[in-house]
Amino acid sequence: MATYSLTTHWYLEAPISQVFDTLGEVPLWPDWWPGLLAVEERDAGADDGTGRVYHYTWQSRLGYRLCFDMRVTRVFRPWLIEGAASGDVCGVGRWRISEQAGVTRVCHEWQVRTTRPWMNLVAPLARPLFVWSHHAVMRNGAEGLARRLGVPLLDFAHL
């Protein structure tokens, strides 16, 4: 299986609580995140969100779709949301959120492996395209979140 460790940073001129709350409204993400075709809540989990399960359908910039479930494993309001992915990708996704001087930094960490045979077969050559596609989807998310909140996106960076 091909493994990926991807980190993305968004900087928004918005209060941390507003950013956290919007990221916590996962079923509404398709309203503002281009490339996210659908989200279905499959398990409500606990009051704090842990145990909640969402099924995502994403459309990549390269034309393929990825479908996976994400089970929320940790929530520390308003700093952290973490989940375990299973499906077309398996691994861990993590939102780390902090605020300084009115600017909220959103750090998304994505440590996954692909499970689709065709993706694993072409990964040695296609890895740069898969990474580019991921970052394009994340840029769409940053721009969409800024629009949703009605605030400027100050910066977008990936490592």
Image: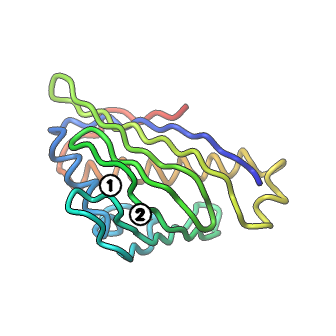
Residue at 63% of width from left, 68% of height from top? 63
Total marks placed = 2
Amino acid at the residue labelled 1:
Gly
Observer-nearest residue: 154 or 26?
A: 26
- What kind of element bears circle 1? helix
Sequence-wise, the earlier of marks 2 and 1 is 2
Task: Give me the residue at 31% from left, 70% from top.
Answer: 27
Q: Where is residue 45 in the image (x, y as percent from the top left)?
A: 30, 67
Kindly give the residue lying farthest to the top in the view shown: 101
Q: As drawn, is 119 to the left or to the right of 151?
A: right
Q: Do the residues labelled 2 and 1 touch (CB within 8 Å)?
A: yes
Q: Residue 144 bears which disc, if any? A: 1
Q: Mark 2 points at which residue?
A: 34
Please give the name of the residue rendered at 48% of the width and 41% of the height, measured from the top-left corner: 109
| Distance from the alpha carbon under mark 2 to that under mark 1 | 7 Å
Indicate left or right for 113 with 142 as reference: right
157 and 117: which is toward the camera: 117
Q: Categorize mark 2 by other alpha carbons within 10 Å: few (<14), some (14-19), many (20+).
A: some
* Quarter of the view holding residue 68: bottom right
